[in-house]
Image: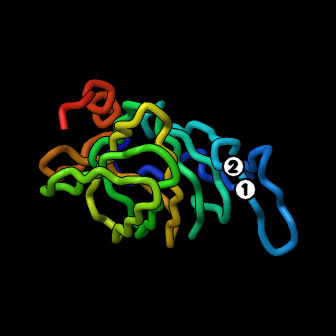
Amino acid sequence: MRKKHGITLLAACALTAMLGTSALAHEGGMLLQDPNAADFQSSPGVPECTSFAGLRGDISKGPGTLMVRMRPGCVVPFHWHTPSEEIVILQGAPLAQMLGERPVMLKVGAYSQLPGKHVHRFRCTSKVDCVLFLVADAAFDIHFVDDSGKEISTEEALKAAATAGNDW
């Protein structure tokens, strides 16, 4: 059976419990000293070269904060999310492209705010992992689309990502 509509990241609940070995939970918050030491986990419905580490909240139910790691060369094809998202680049050099716009190379420290349902894609262009700090203001989902913006199945999107390479 093909899933075409909103895919809630199946591992979202598990992400919220993941704290890396360099994370210290304490009353009122947490401290993660080394983002690369976080407990990144893969999630169904996204390219295998992408993994997540939950930091705050349960993103399957509401607002949350997580880190996203993309391996060098990783492509996350055109997609959108229901919530708005704020992203800060912690490591690497991801190329970001909004549907219909020219790609933009993001550098460490770059900030991006994407409103809900804003179609975009990413490719990690660096020789090191691209690590992004992401804040979502509602339950997190992903809807893949083709180059024209038409919604496609997760399977179609992942197949396209596996063959995309440096074509954009």
| Residue with the most extreme top position | 163
Residue 50 at x, y = what percent?
48, 38
Is residue 48 in view from this perspective?
yes
Tag 1 secondary structure: strand
Quarter of the image that includes the C terminus:
top left
Circle on res. 131: none
Amino acid marked by disc 1:
Leu
Q: Quadrant of residue 60?
A: bottom right
Location of residue 16 with respect to 46 vertically, above or below: below
Q: Quadrant of residue 32?
A: bottom right
Between 121 and 125, the one lying in front of the other is: 125
Residue at the disc numbered 2: 34
Residue 51 at x, y = what percent?
54, 40
Q: Residue at x 19, y 44 (%)?
A: 146
**Left or right of 153 in this view: 59:** right
**Left or right of 21 in this view: 138:** left
Residue at the disc numbered 1: 32
- The Cα atoms of the two marked residues, 1 and 2, are separated by 6 Å
Quarter of the image that includes the N terminus:
top left
Amino acid marked by disc 2:
Asp
Between 162 and 106, the one lying in front of the other is: 106
Give the colour scheme of this rendering: rainbow
Between 49 and 10, the one lying in front of the other is: 49
Label 1 with label 2: CB-CB less than 8 Å: yes
